Amino acid sequence: MNSAISLSLSSASPITVRSYDGAASSSSSSDLFFRNNSAPSQLRFCGLKREAFSGCKSSSNAVLLKQLRQNTKISASLSGNGTPSKGFDYDLVIIGAGVGGHGAALHAVEKGLKTAIIEGDVVGGTCVNRGCVPSKALLAVSGRMRELQNEHHMKSFGLQVAAAGYDRQGVADHAENLATKIRNNLTNSLKSLGVDILAGVGTVVGPQKVKYGKVGGSETVITAKDIIIATGSVPFVPKGVEVDGKTVITSDHALKLETVPEWIVIVGSGYIGLEFSDVYTALGSEVTFVEALDQLMPGFDPEIGKLAQRVLINPRKIDYHTGVFATKITPAKDGKPVTIELIDAKTKEPKDTLEVDAALIATGRAPFTQGLGLENVNVETQRGFIPVDERMRVIDSKGELVPHLYCIGDANGKMMLAHAASAQGISVVEQVSGKDHVLNHLSIPAACFTHPEISMVGLTEPQAREKAEKEGFEIGIAKTSFKANTKALAENEGEGIAKLIYRPDNGEILGVHIFGMHAADLIHEASNAIALGTRVQDIKYAVHAHPTLSEVIDELFKSAKVKNDVSCAVAEPIAV
């Protein structure tokens, strides 16, 4: 990709569409997405641009359609980096060129802001280089291996396939090549727009002032009207775990696929652990999960988690220990295997000692916020996270806002997903451009790219019931099965369900959870509905192509029973 193309539809209420390459995934269980949250406050608007949807009601799309019909003049142009505000080197400086920083930079240029981005490693950050992007390449391989190895599945199509095999280095190269391609795309998009990419470690040295440079080398001080911290996260390694990068590894090492061990322990059964179990078992490994909580996949909706365990874990070469901590993990050495000492999570009594070929530490991620110079603006981290309000504005140790300083993505801990970081960055740019904007995090979807996939948006059933009890309303549950979907049956992929949690009194969508083929792609209709405040009684009239997997969601909304089947105005969502 050489540039970002801005398409603007000219009218009194312009609607802007911007296209650029990006990547997003998940890395931890859903309960771990929401961290370090301040008390929820009312959201003035969410997601899409205010001018496009102000005054719209979920009962009708007439207002929006009228605007679109009036927008007859369409222009396309290449945006350029702007001229900085008087007295500053830049309008906006972003520390960190991951997915969040990249998204903020592109939007800033679109808004005419003179922008620079500081990166001490490589463009793309964790997601592109050591996370969502290369992991999807490995999961693409595991999906094909599973299909080819499933003789019954292939015979059902009338196909005969010889024994499937793989080249480990070829698989590893596929992951590395994909990461390189996406990284180059992101770098080229920034350069083509004139964003200054400043190599080095960025540090806040005072209000509206940043220095950058190589460690041990010379440093340059620059000024900016506004600063965004977007430094991301690193794998979290608990105490007592000795990582050697060979036999005891983190996700950073695992993505290189230097070996495929016969028996590997995965510590943690969230998104990272679940996805790697899919990869390793497809390539022939035996897997043992070690989970501190009493059940596997604790962050998922419990009903979805139980079904996922029945499909993704029980039939495969996977066993597990729940309710235990791995207090000490020692790498293989001198012919001895990896040793893992387990204790009871509650009593702390010794439980077992495992001897295996390798161990993957998948216990989540920790914010990368050290060395940012936060003390220079009187900011103290909370468990490593930078405290922010609902507008991503940084809060100092006295509870006051630090002027012109923002933090997005994993570093603030609100929702540790790459696409959430990008959305937060765009929201900040809207604010510094003069438009108040608060992102509704409950409308941001998450996905686990196993085979089949898992996706969700909004609240789980226990979370919804807790909210309903506090606020005095009832909840409704609707479900549909992939077994009734023509396209899924044509693919012989009928395993899966979709689940809707909603308010039967007014049709508000509280949460949607999907387990099944292409669940990660299907969730966005629900997430957009939550973002726009669309109610069940309105979205059930949407038309879906037949036969497609999208009809699973169509039937889900149609099966919901709303007591007052009258269209309602868009409600104000809650900012998280």
Image (cartoon, helix red, strand yellow):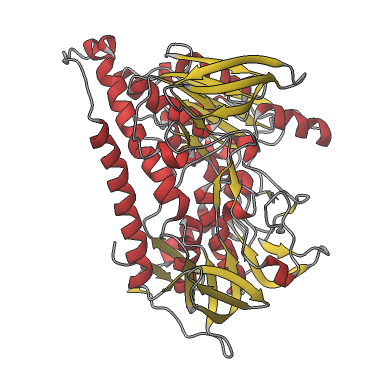
Instruction: Tell me, yes or no, if residue 453 can be seen here.
Output: no
Q: Please tell me whether residue 64 is drawn above or below residue 328 in the rendered image.
A: below
> Is 533 left or right of 274, judged from the image as shown?
right
Instruction: Tell me, yes or no, if residue 474 can be seen here.
Output: yes
Task: Kindly identify the residue that appears in the image at 43 percent across and 43 percent down.
Answer: 132
Depth check, front residue: 34 or 301: 34
Q: Quadrant of residue 457?
A: top right
- Number of callouts in the render? 0
Q: Please tell me whether residue 476 is drawn above or below residue 83 in the rendered image.
A: above
Task: Kindly identify the residue that appears in the image at 38 percent across and 29 percent down.
Answer: 549
Depth check, front residue: 373 or 32: 373
Task: Kindly identify the residue that appears in the image at 61 percent across and 21 percent down.
Answer: 341
Q: Please tell me whether residue 485 is drawn above or below residue 34 in the rendered image.
A: above
Q: Please tell me whether residue 306 is drawn above or below residue 236 in the rendered image.
A: above
Outermost residue on the front side: it is: 334
> Is 410 left or right of 125, judged from the image as shown?
right
Depth check, front residue: 434 or 343: 343
Picture coordinates of residue 51, whole percent (x, y): 56, 65
Picture coordinates of residue 103, whole percent (x, y): 47, 61
Depth check, front residue: 434 or 25: 25
Picture coordinates of residue 534, whole percent (x, y): 59, 44
Q: Quadrant of the N terminus?
A: bottom left
Picture coordinates of residue 408, whole percent (x, y): 59, 58
Q: Quadrant of residue 221?
A: bottom right
Q: Quadrant of residue 315?
A: top left
Task: Kindly identify the residue that appears in the image at 72 percent across and 67 percent down.
Answer: 375
